[in-house]
Image (cartoon, rainbow, N blue to C red):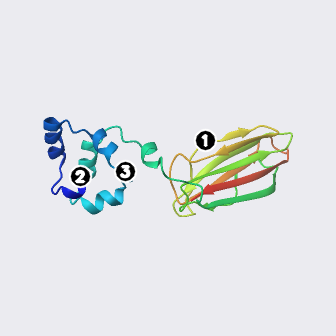
Amino acid sequence: MISTVTNLTAACLVTNAVTSNLTAACLIATVTNLTAACLISTVTNLTAACMISTVTNLTAACLLANQTLVDRAVQDATTTAVTTASTSLTPSTTRNVLTLSQFSLGVSNSCATGLVVQLQISPDNVNFTNDTGTFLVPQNDARSFTPSRFAKYARLQYAAQTAGCTVTFVEFFQGQV
């Protein structure tokens, strides 16, 4: 139907819906293999407002239902045996996360004392800001951190909970393109 209609507008669809009981559900039910590329190539002056005005209950889950994420590239790194006895926060390895759609940084504290951790982000690898408050990772426990805001670089800061007590932990970084 779309390929034979020119100047298709929301008003046109609404007018036809009133006269011939045409609904968005009816259109979607009768069209198979409908893709954004197909719509864009056959409809001129297509706007987001036009699409939204004619389709209700459009969700990301609906759009991604037929997409497969199996072949997406991943990054995975482990920094082993980081040791500190200082109660001053010390930065860990900085990661460039600009090309990742999602990532997490984590720590596994295998010591008998607590570890204080804080996530930081930066647009330029020079000026870092705290994305989270400080978190205590108890003895023999692990925590994962993801930022609440977007920036090009991310890193953890860490410190021993108690002055003079040495803490050894493992830092993890995992991301998906």
> Observer-nearest residue: 66 or 168?
66
Q: For the image shown, how many numbered marks are present on the structure?
A: 3
- Give the labeled residue for mark 2: 1
| Amino acid of disc 1 | Gly
126 vs 81, nearest the viewer: 81
Q: Which residue is mark 3?
A: 32
Type of residue at label 3?
Thr
Q: Are the two marked residues, 1 and 2, in contact with CB atoms closer than 8 angstroms?
A: no
**Place of residue 83 in the rendered image (x, y in percent of width and height, measured from the top left):** 82, 53
Q: Earlier in the sequence, mark 1 or mark 2?
A: 2
Instruction: Kindly state the secondary structure of the residue where label 2 is placed.
Output: loop
Q: Which residue is mark 1?
A: 133
Closer to the camera: disc 1 or disc 2? 2
Q: Secondary structure at mark 1?
A: loop
Mark 2 surroundings: few (<14), some (14-19) or many (≥20) residues within 10 A: few
Earlier-in-chain disc, 3 versus 1: 3
Q: Position of residue 37 (x, y in %)?
A: 35, 60
Q: Position of residue 143 (x, y in %)?
A: 70, 42
